[in-house]
Image (cartoon, rainbow, N blue to C red):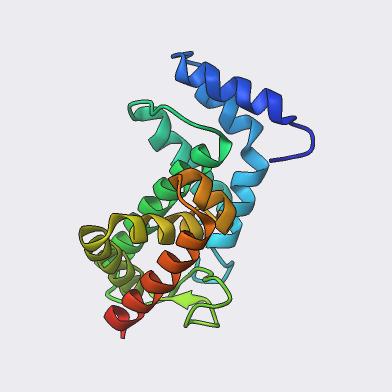
Amino acid sequence: MSDSEPQGDIQALVQALNDGDPDAASALFKALYSQLRLLARARLASGPAMTLDPTALVHEAFLRIDRSTPTALNDSSHFIGIVGRVMRRVIIDHARRRQALKRGADPLMTTMPPDQADPDGGLTADQLVALDSALQALEARDSNMSRVVELKYFAGLSMAEIAEALVISERSVHRLWRSARAWLLTRMD
């Protein structure tokens, strides 16, 4: 959250959205725009082969959210979690389109958390689609592990924010994160 947008104003927008205000989603998006853009920038590394930039990612995510059925929100972290999930879909759709155009050429650059296996942060479109498939399989196995990965990697939430969003202890989040990473790494090798 930016310093220019007090917590009370954000919570009022969340409440307005929950109450069915048709303009609340747009206002909440605008209030959190700089934070969402930073999140998008963290998901994408600029490179010569990159055709999706942070602004485009944020705007496409908003368009998809704006067209969907409203979800009751708990707080701004919950909204950012939803945006993170939508950003994942945008990135995966972009990777699939690139695969269709040119099978595996020109890597789609993304950034992974520093403790991930890919220190350079570059995933090809094929690897990104494989990651999405692995996350879908993980979701079928354990939806909490999948949500933790999604909220940490795609939404950029801290462990404490993830615990709050999932209504579980922070210690459980750390355990789920370790288990999910190990499971995904065995599937991605």
Question: Which is more toward the observer, 84 or 49?
Answer: 84
The spot of residue 180 in percent (x, y) is: 37, 70
Determine whether 79 is above or below 108 in the image.
above
The spot of residue 111 in percent (x, y) is: 54, 69
Question: Which is more toward the observer, 140 or 127?
Answer: 140
Question: Which is more toward the observer, 142 or 131?
Answer: 142
The spot of residue 127 in percent (x, y) is: 34, 75
Quadrant including the N terminus: top right
What residue lies at 57% left-to-right and 36% top-to-bottom? 76
Determine whether 27 is above or below 139 in the image.
above
Q: Image check: 87 left or right of 143?
A: right
Determine whether 61 is above or below 119 in the image.
above
What residue lies at 50% left-to-right and 59% top-to-bottom? 152
What residue lies at 58% left-to-right and 28% top-to-bottom? 28
The spot of residue 49 in percent (x, y) is: 49, 71
- Residue 42 image-quadrant placement: bottom right
Q: Image check: 30 left or right of 164?
A: right
